[in-house]
Image: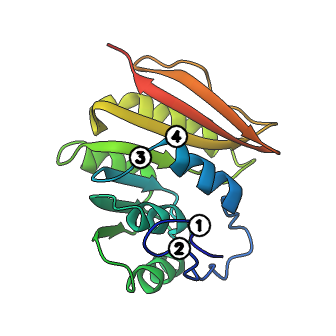
Amino acid sequence: MKITGGKYARMNISSVSDKRTRYTPAIVREALFNMINVEGMDILELFGGSGIISAEALSRSAGSVTIVEISKSSCDTIRKNLERIDGKIKILNLDFRIALRRLVQKQKFDLVFADPPFGTGLLIETFNEIDRYPDILNKDGIIVIESFEKELPPDQGRTIYLSNRKTYGDVILNFYEKMD
């Protein structure tokens, strides 16, 4: 995998050895960062995998990235991938539910990106957990949940609502904002 744009464009990012890990395609990553200017943003990536989304964000001058990943081996890969990239980086080897509960008390983010494993039931649970902690977002913050065409998150929760949905083949980016 290669970073698609910014300061580190074309830098190789190693994949993780777990074959169950699915990566956000390059065309989707590029589209995401063409829609959202992340310069100076504080970003939370849930289900970090290889850390490619955070690497892309740092390459485009994000202020900081916090990556949550439950797999220790994936966290090791993320550390290795990001050691060559400048930026403020925090890697949390935790379940996303625990991480959200802890982070909401300490930090707010401009962008929360979640890419739960497809077809595992974690998509709805991820939506519900983010909906439970709307204060994880800064005032004009954005939530992006990646899904696939056969499994979509709800259009609205108690505290967040769908503002946009973009489809790239069978990959869908669902954009959410906080309700006023």
Q: Secondary structure at mark 1?
A: loop
**Mark 3 or mark 4, which has the lower sequence index?**
3
Q: Residues within 10 Å of mark 2 (few under 14, many from 20)?
A: some
Image mark for residue 9: 2
Residue plotted at (27% across, 32% down): 135
Distance (Cα) linking label 4 and label 2: 22 Å
Could you say where residue 46 lies in the image, as x and y percent from the top left?
A: 47, 54
Q: Answer left or right for 174 relative to 6.
A: right
**Mark 1 or mark 3, which has the lower sequence index?**
1
Whether residue 122 is situated above or below residue 24 in the rendered picture: above
Q: Are marks 1 and 3 in contact (CB under 8 Å)?
A: no
Could you say where residue 86 lies in the image, as x and y percent from the top left?
A: 31, 77
Could you say where residue 70 lies in the image, as x and y percent from the top left?
A: 48, 65
Please give the residue where the numbered disc 3 appears in the rendered image: 37
Q: Are marks 2 and 1 in contact (CB under 8 Å)?
A: yes
Q: Residues within 10 Å of mark 3 (few under 14, many from 20)?
A: few
Render colour scheme: rainbow
Please give the residue where the numbered disc 4 appears in the rendered image: 144
**Mark 2 or mark 1, which has the lower sequence index?**
1
Q: Secondary structure at mark 3?
A: loop
Residue plotted at (34% across, 62% down): 61
Please give the residue where the numbered disc 1 appears in the rendered image: 4
Q: Secondary structure at mark 4?
A: strand
**Mark 1 or mark 4, which has the lower sequence index?**
1
